[in-house]
Amino acid sequence: MILQALNRYYDILIKDPQAEVAPFGYGTVNVGFALNLSTEGDLLDVLPLYTQEQRGNKVVEVPRPMIVPEQVKRTSGVNPNFLCDTSAYVLGLSGKDEARQAYSQDRFSAFRRFNSELLAKADSDAARATAAYLERHEPSTANGHPAIIRYLDALLSGGNLVFLFRGAFVHEDPAIREVWGKYKAGLEAVSMQCLVTGEIAPIARLHPSLKRVRGAQSSGATLVGFNASAYESYGHTQGLISPVSEVATFAYGTALNYLLSERNPNKKFFLGDATVVYWAESDSHQVYEGDFASLLDPDYVEDEASLQNEGRAKAEAALKETAGKVRRAQMIDLKALQAHLEKENPRFFVLGLAPNAARVSVRFFITDPFEEIIRSILAHYDDMEIVREYENQPRYLTVGRVLSETVSKKSRDKDASPLLAGAVFRAILANTPYPTGLYYAIINRIRADADDADRGIHKINYVRAAAIKAFLIRKYRYQSQNPFKEVLVMALNEQSTIPAYVLGRLFAVLEKVQLEAIGNINASIKDRYFTSACASPRSVFPILLRLSQHHIAKAEYGYASDRRIQDILNLLDIDKNPIPAHLNLDEQGIFVLGYYHQRAAFYNQSDRQALAVPTAPTV
């Protein structure tokens, strides 16, 4: 299904002039130099093709991306490309010649033989000039050529070279393109039924390498591949085990590499160990993809000028307007959106790829109509919504912000568990209950962490409280009874008598009494007692209540706090329902929620100024 979806996406990209994807038989590679040839095949000059890019505070030179004849997938041995290759093949020069005798000579000989055979079939001046160069070029004296000496170090670094004749690239010559097309169509390959298209066609022996998957090999990793006899079946080896045609293999590889590349305006993002790409099955795919990206990160701001493109469909114009609303943190009216889009609701795809040695594995693959994807993301934001302690805290809690709270701030590795990240993201896009692992991870971080303002560590914070609320909402949403429904709300519920919630509120009051009495101290009651109070309240709260009497006596407004404590204890009705000995995991989450709600209700702006509470931490 993944390969079929990518194959269809390639058909969309090939019609999109902005995408600039390569046609069948060609590929996009980075080219550093062009060899300018004369009619007789002499090397006139070496022309650098580097372009300048701003990277941070520096301007760096990078090779130019160029569509050239499709390159072979090299593992070992000598295997030349057509009209575009490294200096070892094109010039017979390499930095490895000193260590390995005849290294470049063997490669140039193979390049000369392969290219000369094809160029002899093309009737053009460019083909004859290039063939003459291959016949006359002598690698042993090449490093003495004035044009080569000027760029020798850069040429030996391993970048690609192409040929230039009369101001045009040789590989773009019409006669040569025709010869190359016939060659690709006539490759000796076994014909079988393609699993992607269903057609009888030549089957690809090797599948393309995917570039820019974080953590995978820099030379590229394979999505489909077999390299051991254990995988062989009925005598079939390599690509014949899972037959995909040459055309379909090229299409899905080109589409996926485009999604992973910097040329894609809607950038990939990272979740745990997964590199996430996404696409829409629509001619207006870029705008749908932009909406998805901006909705996942409402703080994202796109240059509106880049969205201006005359002649686009009315549906795309409506989507632009919607995207702008998302960036301004406004909710989308899905019914109005569908009406504006003239009932177009394309299928949307989200693919997470994780590194696995020389291969990539599929961490998740989610597909739904675009409307359902948006509805699910908005439902996530609704479930996560909770009262904020500070105005500068983000209104929308993205998946990245939630997952960051499952990792210790002291850890060097800031990535969340890969399996947890994938499970949480699937739950968001499918609008299903969050994985239990998320809840456990948040509770464990609350137990383990101690407040440390210098490191930005806060035992109970806005994101953790929101995640607990959202998890419990979704856990009980489809059950017949929800014992905590009345407190799974945005802000404080002062009427609730749920013991865990009331005890959480009580702990917040006792903490505030201590703060009013003796100010900030190194070890507050939260640092010393919160974890125990949350799990085994009966063993802790009698101690805290006795301590509170000393704090009340010292505090300027202790009488008000004493009355508040009594009001909360009355909600417990201790004579009939004593403080529980233990709270289960769900109740511990409710305890945390009660504590957070009460604390957020306390610290309005005037309270912060009076108590000298520090400014909001960065979430």
Image (cartoon, rainbow, N blue to C red):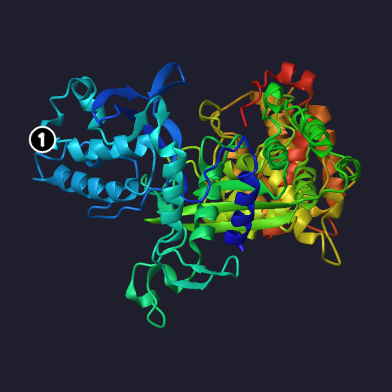
Report whether residue 338 is seen: yes
- Residue 117: give x, y in percent of width and height: 29, 51
**Residue closest to the eye, 213 or 296:** 213
Instruction: Find the residue positioned furthest to the front.
Output: 123
Name which residue lies at 54% across and 54% down.
Answer: 252
Mark 1 crowd level (few <14, some 14–19, many ≥20, 10 Å Cα):
few
The quadrant of the image that shows the N terminus is: bottom right
Q: Quadrant of the C terminus?
A: top right
Residue 93 visible to an observer of this rendering: no
Residue 241 is left or right of residue 150, and the answer is right
583 lies above or below 305: below
- Looking at the picture, which amino acid does disc 1 mark? Ser
Between 127 and 273, which is closer to the camera in this rendering? 127
Q: Residue at x 14, y 28 (%)?
A: 143
> Is residue 591 shown left or right of residue 200?
right
Tell which of 18 and 185 is nearer to you. Answer: 185
On screen, residue 55 above or below 120: above
Instruction: Give the residue at mark 1.
Output: 140
- Considering the numbered disc 1 on the image, is that residue within a helix, a strand or a loop? helix
- Residue 55: percent from the left, percent from the top? 46, 22
Relative placement, left or right, of 442 versus 63 is right
Horizontal relation, residue 538 to residue 82: left or right: right
Residue 162 locus on image (x, y percent): 34, 34
Q: For residue 153, what is the image quadrant?
A: top left
Task: Give x and y (percent) for residue 512.
Answer: 71, 31
Residue 158: quadrant of the picture: top left
Q: Quadrant of residue 100?
A: top left
